[in-house]
Amino acid sequence: MEDLNLFIKSIFIDNMIFAYFLGMCSFLAVSKNVKTAFGLGIAVTFMLVVTLPINYMLDKYLLQPGAMKWLGEEFATVDLSFLALIMFIAVIASITQLVEMAVEKFSPSLYASLGIFLPLIAVNCAILGCALFMQQRDFGSAWTATVYGAGSGIGWMLAIVGLAAIREKLAYSNIPKPLRGIGITFILTGLMGIAFMSFLGIKL
């Protein structure tokens, strides 16, 4: 039940876009088309589901103070926590490379439409932010970290697909010239953020 609560909370209440403003660069740039936005959302969700349990295991059994005591008593005082950021980024970059190769092979059209933003998943602050939140909240198991990653990814995908759908409809709207393009996008993002604040009233 706690995992279900965490899953729902990470989608709606602790949304990476509207609660923490993480991953905004690709959120604003790739949200012009629903198909492309959905493809990137799937890629980000996959990245979070795969990398978060890996980073959890690294943190739990290698990086935390005393985490290496399973190797022997002489390692009980070893503290590698200063390597956490580097290790998290290395894992994310490695998995991103695999995702990029898979998308290029199986969906060349999506690969072309995403352009530079697909390899930039490696530096998407939403993915690294999830890893750091996972470390900060000290989840009890790799499964809980995976649930949190899945919820955060779906929340990010929900946000970008929702914005892309609205922006597609705006193509047929008479928007004042000063607000066309990124201007109206910022306004829409703010309004969506306010809408998501309504979920703060949910008691889980």
Image (cartoon, rainbow, N blue to C red):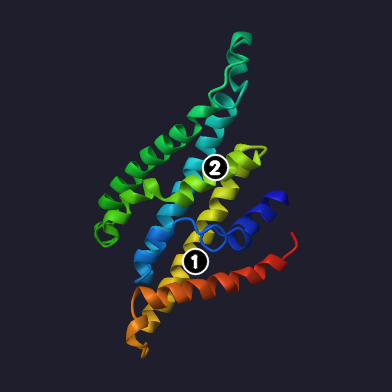
Q: Is residue 80 visible?
A: yes
Residue at coordinates 35% horizontally, 71% vertically from top-left?
A: 33
Total numbered circles: 2
The tag earlier along the polypeptide, 2 or 1, is: 2
Image quarter of residue 194 = bottom right
Disc 2 versus disc 1: nearer the observer: 2
Given contact means CB atoms under 8 Å apart, are the residues at marks 2 and 1 in contact? Answer: no
Q: Quadrant of residue 177?
A: bottom left
Q: Is residue 79 left or right of residue 138?
A: left
Tell which of 77 and 157 is nearer to you. Answer: 77
Q: In this image, 113 relative to 35: left or right?
A: left
User: Which residue: 38% across, 59% down?
Assistant: 26
Residue bearing mark 1:
159
Q: Disc 2 on helix, strand or loop?
A: helix
Above or below, 35 relative to 25: below
Q: Is residue 30 visible?
A: no
Residue sitting at 67 percent across and 37 percent down?
A: 140
Relative to 83, is 47 above or below?
Answer: below
Quadrant where the image shows the C terminus: bottom right
- Local crowd size for mark 1, using a 10 Å CA cut-off: few (<14), some (14–19), many (≥20): many
State the residue position of label 2.
Answer: 132
Identified by mark 2, the residue type is Leu
Q: Height in image: 160 above or below 191?
A: above
Q: Amino acid at mark 1?
A: Ala
Estimate the x, y position of residue 132 in percent, counting from the top left: 54, 42
- CA–CA distance in space, label 2 to label 1: 21 Å
The answer to which of 15 and 42 lies nearer the viewer is 15
Relative to 120, residue 54 above or below: above
Closer to the camera in the image, 179 or 66: 179
Give x and y (percent) for residue 11.
58, 60
Specify few, some or many for label 2: CA neighbours under 10 Å numbering under 14, 14-19, or 20 or more. some
Furthest toward the right, the residue is 203
